[in-house]
Image (spheres, rainbow, N blue to C red):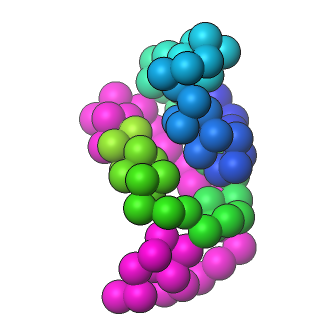
Amino acid sequence: MFISMGELVHTLKTEDISRKSHTRLTRIRKANLVIIDDLMFMAMDQHEANLFFHLINELYDKSSIILTSNKDPKEWGTYWGNQQ
């Protein structure tokens, strides 16, 4: 399953109010491989970062995960509102 980070954040935020988002996340959760493109495409607020963390935590034991980013991992904290 391939999804861009922007699409994923939108889907996570609207899962409870959109049937399409709920269906898409169900497919993501069942996928053997999840590819998330352009991980640091946009800054996330704390709520969005928490939703993303919980999804990754959920997928960790069940799926292979590939993350792509053009940012150095050292910069990731600034996009998630964490300077450390």
Q: Residue at x 48, y 70 (%)?
A: 80
Of residues 83 and 13, the one drawn nearer to the viewer in this rendering: 13
Segment colored magenta: 57-84
Q: Is residue 22 visible?
A: yes
Q: Residue at x 46, y 76 (%)?
A: 81
Above or below: residue 27 compared with residue 78:
above
Task: Specify whether residue 20 is painted magenta.
Answer: no
Of residues 21 and 32, the one drawn nearer to the viewer in this rendering: 21
The quadrant of the image that shows the N terminus is top right
The quadrant of the image that shows the C terminus is bottom left
Q: Position of residue 31 (x, y in %)?
A: 51, 23
Q: Is residue 25 visible?
A: no
Task: Locate residue 73 relative to residue 36 in the image: left or right.
Answer: left
Above or below: residue 50 compared with residue 77:
above
Task: Locate residue 78 relative to residue 42 in the image: left or right.
Answer: left
Taking the view exactly as shown, the residue that stands out farthest to the front is 17
Above or below: residue 43 compared with residue 24:
below
Q: Position of residue 37 (x, y in %)?
A: 69, 52
Q: Residue at x 41, y 45 (%)?
A: 51
Task: Specify whether residue 71 is painted magenta.
Answer: yes
Report the number of numbered marks.
Answer: 0
Q: Position of residue 72 (x, y in %)?
A: 59, 82
The quarter holding residue 57 reads top left
Q: Residue at x 55, y 20 (%)?
A: 17
